[in-house]
Image (spheres, coloured by chain):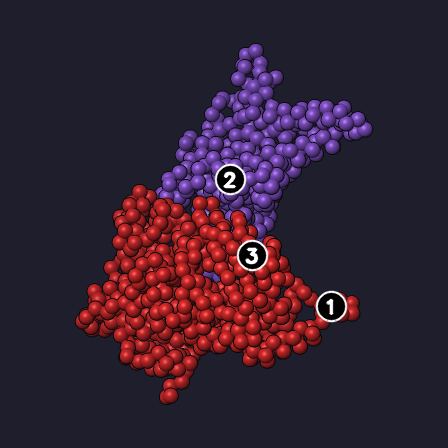
Chain colours: A red, B purple
Amino acid sequence: MSLELRGITKTFGALVANDSIDLRVETGEIHAILGENGAGKSTLMNIVYGLVAPDSGEILVDEVLKKISEPSDALASGIGMVHQHFMLVPVFTVAENIVLGHEKTGFAGRLDLNEARERIKKVSDQFNFNVNPDDLIEGLPVGVQQRVEIIRALIYDAKVLILDEPTAVLTPQETNDLLKIMQELKAQGTSIIFITHKLREVKAVADRITIIRRGKVVGNASPDASQNELASLMVGREVELAPERGAHEIGSDVLVVSDLSILDITGRALVSKVNFSVKAGEVLAIAGVQGNGQSEVARAMVNLEPLVQGSITLDGEEIVGKSVRESLHAGIAFVPESRELDGLIGSMSIAENLMLDLHDLPPYARGVQLFPAIVLSQAERQREEFDIRLQSVSDPISSLSGGNKQKVVLARELSRPVKLLVASQPTRGLDVGSIEFVHKRILEERDSGRAVLLFSTELDEVLALADRIAVMYRGEILSIVPAGVSAQELGLLMAGVVNA
Amino acid sequence: MHKLLSKRPSLRALTLPGLAFLLAMFFGALLIAFSDSTVLKHIGHPLAFLKAAGVAVWQSYLALFEGSVYNPSLATPHDALLSWYPLSETLVTAAPLMLAGLSVALAFRAGLFNIGAQGQFIFGSIAASYVGFHFHLPLGVHLIAAVLAAVVAGALWGGLVGLLKARTGAHEVIVTIMLNYVALYFLMWLLGTTRFLRPGRRDPISPDVLTSARMPLLAGSNYRVNLGIFVALAAATFVWWLLTRSTWGFRFRAVGANSAAAKTAGISVPFVMTSVMAISGALAGLGGAVHVLGSDFSLTSGTAGNFGFDAITVALLGRAKPMGVVFASILFGALRAGGGTMQANTSTPIDIVLVIQALVVLFIAAPSVVKWVFRLKNVKTTGELAAKGWNG
């Protein structure tokens, strides 16, 4: 089934999200739509799926004009969509989730899942999904939950499948599995629209690539184009994908972590007896698949974890047992894993977010008196240094793009005297341009003699930035390897394979 | 307001509460019309019915106005100004309500739903009244001592909630509801003790507060309006300063908006919860003092009336902003003061006032109704405000 979009335009106030976009997806092709965050990819797909009404434009399915004003219209036309954030009920089984909204009932309203079970099994076997219809969603890994979403689309006869940033939440292994599934689907005649900003994946599976920038189609590319070419088209300027690593000196130990164990509230060890150290002028990356204890180790660096045993010293000074505030002021800059949840206060202004940690110290305050004018002027200064793109520092932080939000977090954390930078997933969900900025800044910190502790699940990021790499698996450090390790080797270590 | 904190013109902030109030008045008018027997007599004749309804509504709302702001028939040949007597009554009711409303609003801003203003108000009343009737102190000192006692009592009663939440995670809504009962029954028990029972009385009422501890009257002995309204306005200014110009308020707002991020930035969330509830309690306690020392003078089991609960409505209507609370409490004070006159002068029961109050809250909590009726777009809503407190 082919899908054609003609002149799709959508504006939100003054923002033109989609500017007369034309797009054609052929039967059985994987069509990648590449663009930075905020380029208008998601808006376009929400229009195709009937979640957003376009201002103008036409949608044709198999050369027939279709009016799609609700998701049910899209499903009826054979268009299915898997959202970035899954729409699943965690306490329901796979089968229950799939029949939701289309339940078949038997005698006296009894829910009849047998037919759904059969169909799920059939689809699962056909594409090697390995999904059991009776598993509870909350017990399934993220990658499998995503397959459930795909099955749901396929069961309702989707011939065009929209995948919105499908790999954002996946581990490297799960990503590879998904790419295989996509090829399998394609081989059996399903068209796939693959929304992403990850160049490697596009090159791996796409048949054709459409690049969107600021709401407009700026070009088409074939998968043979180099990553640098694609990135430049996407961002609109030359981009350095692998940041240059300056010559620098490695000093003495700044951070020493010995026998660190972290327990959850029931006393179970999430992290057990971890040892590592970071020297001045060095980036130590802690790699690992999400959920192997890295998040907890990162949080423990500033005492955000309540139950910690062992020792963490910063220039010889014990950190464990201090308050969060004391840890930060001892010289640790902390970039939390979740910008939205832990890094920023969405309803407060950009300027206020830039001084959360220093709000009761000069120059912002004297005694209990706060000086709003100084908050603004300091924010202007930081905005220039960190190139934060904004209209006004008094705007709420929620008005910024992901990349600019991360710049705010970095600007705030690096405005204190810092010996150690702890950055947890610092580029998660960011676009190429912002990733470039964050990477450069991290290396600048290293080159100026600070210790950097980087937590990342992205192989590319770890390999680009680290001087040494520690791999965490099930709450322990499997091994610490030098930077020269290959991506494949690292991937195996992250999967828990030590001697391959 | 400083542009750091709000870019929204204040006029637009008033749109939703204002329209909600209009809509509530409209439904109130319908109720007045359909509950009036003379109006209903004309139900078969549309024109006559409309006319009668118009007269009934006009008379009721006129009485409401005359009971709350200005009533020319009260003027005497000696004193024309007496026609403003109702306004004095409005302000007398508004002052304690304003303080209790500020209490709820402040806690709201820190993400806490203080249902306990009633209990804190009661403790403030008890402390102020006890100092007021039991001790003999010089003029001025006595009043200050009574007010301070109320502030401390309210702060302790409120701070207890914050401490429980910070230490044990107990939800403040449950705790404050329960503490309201404790406060009420403590008051009733006290009124049975010899220390608090007025000599010669058997019904639960305390001695009158001595004149040295009373709030000075502002407009002479013909009017009840007293220093309390200025105390309340000063408190509103203080809360405004606290929230927008102080490091404490900054912390309160940060914790209220996203406690996880506040914690990550090194702000002590337990300390904020305890201190905000203590200050919130102090404000409600001050409300109790203003009520007892300004207009009631003695404690009864019904001393706190409905102030602590109306305070929630007032805070909601005022969008948890000090300026908003000032306006909302004066409005509610007017409704309360005018309701009595309306009931006396027309056949409209005072309950209509309660219905209007309830509808205002309902429309503010469901802003889409107001937007739909008035065909509004892009007006900021307070929906998230009401929900926030429950997330704990």
- Asked which secondary structure carries label 1, the reply is loop
Q: Which mark is residue B318?
A: 2
Residue B392 appears at what percent x and percent y? 51, 56
CA distance separating discs 2 and 3:
47 Å
Q: Which residue is drawn at 40% across and 85% down?
A: A497
Q: Which three-letter amino acid code belongs to the residue tagged 2?
A: Gly
Which of the 4 image quadrants contains residue A188?
Answer: bottom right
- Asked which secondary structure carries label 2, the reply is loop
Give the class, few, some or many, for how many residues have Cα within 10 Å of label 2's Cα (few <14, many ≥20): many
The residue nearer to you, when weighing B301 against B26, is: B26
Residue A480 appears at what percent x and percent y? 31, 80
Q: Which three-letter amino acid code belongs to the residue tagged 1?
A: Thr
Chain label for disc 3: A
Q: Nearer the viewer, mark 1 or mark 3?
A: 3
In the picture of the structure, the residue carrying the numbered disc 1 is A105
Chain label for disc 2: B
CA distance separating discs 1 and 2:
50 Å
Q: Which three-letter amino acid code belongs to the residue tagged 3?
A: Ile
Give the class, few, some or many, for how many residues have Cα within 10 Å of label 3's Cα (few <14, many ≥20): many
In the picture of the structure, the residue carrying the numbered disc 3 is A59
Q: Residue at x 41, y 54 (%)?
A: A214
CA distance separating discs 1 and 3:
35 Å
| Quadrant of the snapshot with the N terminus of chain B | top left
Q: Is residue B157 visible?
A: no
